Amino acid sequence: MGVVREHLEMIQGRALVCVVVSPSPLSWDEFEGSSVVLRVQDDADGREALRELNAARDLQVSLARLLVLEVPDIEGLALVRRLAPDIWSFVDLTVEVIEEAGRSIEPAPPRYAFFIAHGPEDTRYAEELAEHLSPLAEVFLDTLSLKPGDDLRRERDRAQRESGVTVALFSLKTSLDGQLMGAILSALQLEEQHPGGHLLVPVVLDRDGAKGGALPPGLRARTFLNAATLGLKGVVDALLKLAGRTQVDRTSEIDAQRAAIGTLSDALRALTPAQFYFLLYRLDVPPMFRDSSEPRAISIAKVLRWAQQAGTLPDLRQALEDVARWSGESSR
């Protein structure tokens, strides 16, 4: 119950409904008075849960009482969706958390140094952080690491189990959506069940948020990195030290690769919009990396990450030379 307790502390006052997946019933005595717990296993349970939700809303005590729906397995989640769609839509509007409390999460052999967890509001910072970390360490970030056709939840879960550090980003505008909360809960489980094998590091992005308002209540006793004070480079250096990796420890080959990436990034930034998108089509960059509505810096970070993973950095360098030559000939 340790992880579940931290979970409820985090969402108390922010959410009305929490879904807990547990093969066997848990003991909820310590939450009596602050929560209503229902185990949903059949149609009658689902209807009772809907009555409890409506009663809580009618009495306007949604911030004082948390409705916990305990289901035995994934089929139980489907039952809640089918019998009480009003409940599920209300969960989606606040915080949807699915915690497999009865199952141990086994860590996998390390593959990534960092797993970056974030809400949609903080995607830009997450991508900038990944761009600066990736030349020095393996990083998983959903918006840059997933490929078309990947099972999002399965790949994220696997990557987190294969990571040494979960970096959780928070700001005053962060919404505690199901994906972010699920990643936090998984990190807490990995820490609890396998001490020393995983670490959860909160990063607060704004100055006011660092005063405590950005972090969920369950994480406020934990030390965090203050991006407003440290700056992006300071956050990167602090994370690399946590992972046992510093710039002076890296080989000259890695340093050269980072310099090469920086040179390519500068060259891409110097292109006109027409030249930039001509180059993307020339390289047959996947459509998901060709969103013209994105800021140029984000598009460049995604393209460079794709080129690294696909092994096409030499092709990118050649394409830049071709574009420069084509532009010179066109201006004559």
Image: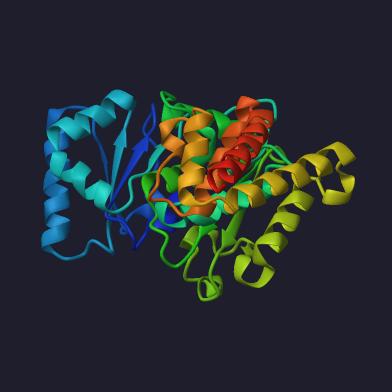
Taking depth in this image into account, of 121 and 57 the one nearest to the observer is: 121
- Left or right? Give the position of 160 relative to 12: right
Q: Quadrant of residue 230?
A: bottom right
Q: Residue at x 75, y 50 (%)?
A: 240
- Left or right? Give the position of 269 relative to 84: right
Q: What's the coloring here?
A: rainbow
Taking depth in this image into account, of 286 and 193 the one nearest to the observer is: 286
Taking depth in this image into account, of 66 and 88 the one nearest to the observer is: 88
Q: Residue at x 45, y 50 (%)?
A: 7
- Left or right? Give the position of 307 relative to 142: right
Q: Residue 95: in sight, yes or no? A: yes
Query: How many numbered markers are drawn?
Result: 0
**In this picture, is 12 found above or below 153?**
below
Q: Position of residue 193 (x, y in %)?
A: 62, 36
Q: Position of residue 177 (x, y in %)?
A: 37, 50
**In this picture, is 73 found above or below 30?**
above
Q: Position of residue 74 (x, y in %)?
A: 33, 26
Q: Residue at x 17, y 34 (%)?
A: 45
Q: Residue 107: in sight, yes or no? A: no
Q: Position of residue 278 (x, y in %)?
A: 48, 38
Taking depth in this image into account, of 210 and 193 the one nearest to the observer is: 210
